[in-house]
Image: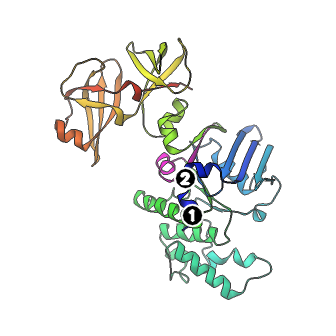
């Protein structure tokens, strides 16, 4: 396994930059698909572009691959500008959402197709050996002679991966590669992709709209919106310190309460909500009195108890209960705040006893767990 798989965060910061977007803009007629993108991509990292449909993440990926040319700005690979370099000349391979496998070829022929285009030609024995090693890596040994239409969706995904990595690219680009798989198989393939990336030690760049997928697999996540990069950071950074409401809403689940800053004291800001209540929270960025903000509280930060009524506790009624195994999700209603979610660990239910629909409880959270965020 590659040494880079276990590099520390500080070591990752010192790695070489294998690709870079410098003020990259892409227009399709009157449509602005990518707007002044600036991003450095590190050697050996797993980076994900995350955002809703139409945010520009696939356009960014296609410009790195060479399938699109920037309208403005530069794409760099290994420090060299490659705006006009054809896709097949870049040290990059791509796995498409629908795999793009050749149905008339066997598994071995699909995987070895790229090697047969190499000049001077490689010996058949060398191609066969490389195909065999690629199949071992994706856990499909002995499938060389199978036809693509005889393979399951997950197996086809592995064939597409083997074909993409057999030429040993510097970067592997993945465009929603797990979207067509069912939930269980998608989970398995997430682990498989991580294992392959760590084994090879090459840079993986994933495009996805699935936040869970990005959070579970990535070293860093690039959040996009309306063709722009909103925030880049580790999954934990984005979850714990989102720069605005958009990021907090897209990374994980959160409850939002809108209002305006009344005052700031030390590490906390007091916010008078549009609903009329006053709550305190920890500003992620500098805020000032009168500023329109949202208070974000993650469901797992909310505590439910049967008794209380003390300072900071809110009387709520359980509206819905969903058992999730280790956790239970509650939808509760406060007469002023309205509905919000609570994610209660199994242990708290064992201590308090299960809460049922219609129960009147007390909800609370630590002031430091509530984040004060820009509304935009």
Height in image: 272 above or below 364?
Answer: above
Tell me where residue 195 appears, x and y as whole percent: 50, 64
**Nearest the camera: 177 or 347?**
347
Tell me where residue 69 appears, x and y as whole percent: 78, 50
Say whether residue 219 is magenta: yes
Number of numbered tags placed on the structure image: 2
- In which quadrant is the C terminus drawn? top right
Would you say 91 lies left or right of 186 here?
A: right
Please give the label number shown on residue 8. Answer: 2
Would you say 158 lies left or right of 19 here?
A: left
Please give the label number shown on residue 94. Answer: none
Tell me where residue 126 appears, x and y as whole percent: 67, 84
Q: Secondary structure at mark 2?
A: loop
**Nearest the camera: 281 or 34?**
281
- In which quadrant is the N terminus drawn? bottom right
Please give the label number shown on residue 3. Answer: 1
The residue segment tinted magenta is 209-225
Residue 106 visible to the viewer: no
Say whether residue 374 is magenta: no
Spatial CA span between label 2 and label 1: 11 Å
- Within-10-Å neighbours for mark 1: few <14, some 14–19, many 20+: few
Task: Evaluate if marks 2 and 1 touch, with contact meaning CB atoms under 8 Å apart.
Answer: no
């Amino acid at each position: 396994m590659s040494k880079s798989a276990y590099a520390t965060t500080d070591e990752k910061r010192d790695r070489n930059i294998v690709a870079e977007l410098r003020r990259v803009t892409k227009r399709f007629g009157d449509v602005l698909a990518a707007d002044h993108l600036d991003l450095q991509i590190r050697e050996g990292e797993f980076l994900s572009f995350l955002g809703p449909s139409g945010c520009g993440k696939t356009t960014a990926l296609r410009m790195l691959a060479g399938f699109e040319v920037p309208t403005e700005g530069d794409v760099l690979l290994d420090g060299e500008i490659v705006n006009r370099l054809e896709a097949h000349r870049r040290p990059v391979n791509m796995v498409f959402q629908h795999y793009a496998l050749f149905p008339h070829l066997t598994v071995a022929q699909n995987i070895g197709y790229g090697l047969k285009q190499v000049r001077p030609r490689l010996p058949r024995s060398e191609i066969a050996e490389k195909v065999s090693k690629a199949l071992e890596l994706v856990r499909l040994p002995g499938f060389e002679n199978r036809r693509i239409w005889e393979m399951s969706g997950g197996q086809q995904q592995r064939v597409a991966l083997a074909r993409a990595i057999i030429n040993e690219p510097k970067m592997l680009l993945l465009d929603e590669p797990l979207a067509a798989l069912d939930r269980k198989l998608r989970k398995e393939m997430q682990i498989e992709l991580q294992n392959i990336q760590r084994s090879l030690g090459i840079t993986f760049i994933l495009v996805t709209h699935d936040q869970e997928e990005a959070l579970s697999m990535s070293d860093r996540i690039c959040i996009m919106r309306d063709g722009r990069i909103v925030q880049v950071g580790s999954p934990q950074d984005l979850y714990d310190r989102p720069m605005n409401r958009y990021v907090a809403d897209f990374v994980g689940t959160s409850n939002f309460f809108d209002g305006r800053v009344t005052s700031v004291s030390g590490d906390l800001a007091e916010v008078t909500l549009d609903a009329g209540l006053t709550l305190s929270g920890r500003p992620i960025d500098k805020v000032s009195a009168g500023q329109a903000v949202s208070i974000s509280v993650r469901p797992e930060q909310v505590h439910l108890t049967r008794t209380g009524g003390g300072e900071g506790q809110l009387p709520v009624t359980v509206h819905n209960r969903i058992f999730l195994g280790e956790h239970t999700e509650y939808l509760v209603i406060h007469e002023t705040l309205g509905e919000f979610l609570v994610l209660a660990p199994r242990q708290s239910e064992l201590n308090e006893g299960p809460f049922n629909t219609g129960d009147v409880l007390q909800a609370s959270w630590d002031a430091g767990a509530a984040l004060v965020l820009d509304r935009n």
